[in-house]
Image (tube, helix red, strand yellow):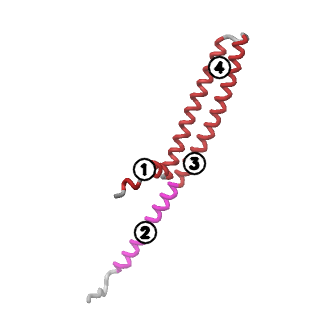
């Protein structure tokens, strides 16, 4: 049986070092939690912003379509020239393109949110196929 009479406070220093390492791990975990929380809130904000922009683009497209129809009726009645009618058609196409871009941005924001939540892995990966 060997009992050290004097260890030079090695055991106390070792315990202090381990406590410091555990505290550092705890701080790193807290930082990662905060970072994930910030990413989640940012992704939710992007989805809400993209949804609002999409609704606005849909409204603008509907307005352009109504103005284009009005220009067509006026052209058919002979009260406006052809360039006015063609400008109305051009505005409709631009509004439709803008709506498509906004819809793509919305889908990208939703995809990012789903990726952060882990829903993509559960939706598209069959875990039972990986297990033997």
Residue 125: image location, x then y, percent: 42, 50
Q: Are marks 1 and 2 in contact (CB under 8 Å)?
A: no
Q: Are marks 4 and 2 in contact (CB under 8 Å)?
A: no
Q: Is residue 71 above or below residue 45?
A: above
Of the residues tagged 4 and 1, which is closer to the observer? 1
Q: Is residue 106 above or below residue 93?
A: below
Q: Are marks 1 and 3 in contact (CB under 8 Å)?
A: no
Residue 108: image location, x then y, percent: 51, 41
Q: Residue furthest left?
A: 1
Question: Which residue is disc 1 drawn over?
Answer: 125
Q: Which mark is residue 88?
A: 4
- Magenta region: 9-36
Question: Which residue is disc 2 drawn over?
Answer: 22
- Classify mark 2: residues with Cα within 10 Å, few (<14), some (14-19) or many (20+): few
Q: Examine the residues drawn in magenta and state their main secondary structure.
A: helix
Q: Is residue 15 above or below residue 127?
A: below
Assess whether residue 22 is covered by the magenta stretch: yes
Q: Residue at x 56, y 32 (%)?
A: 100
Q: Are marks 4 and 1 in contact (CB under 8 Å)?
A: no
Q: Which mark is residue 5?
A: none
């Amino acid at each position: 049986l060997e009992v050290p009479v004097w260890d030079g406070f090695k055991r106390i220093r070792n315990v202090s070092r381990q406590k410091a390492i555990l505290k550092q791990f705890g701080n790193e975990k807290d930082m990662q939690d905060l970072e994930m929380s910030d990413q989640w809130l940012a992704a939710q904000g992007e989805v809400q912003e993209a949804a609002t922009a999409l609704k606005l683009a849909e409204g603008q497209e509907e307005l352009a379509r109504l103005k284009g129809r009005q220009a067509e009726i006026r052209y058919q009645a002979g009260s406006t020239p052809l360039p006015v009618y063609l400008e109305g058609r051009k505005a409709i196409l631009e509004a439709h393109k803008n709506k498509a871009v906004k819809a793509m941005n919305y889908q990208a924001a939703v995809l990012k949110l789903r990726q952060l939540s882990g829903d993509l892995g559960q939706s598209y990966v069959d875990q039972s196929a990986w297990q033997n």
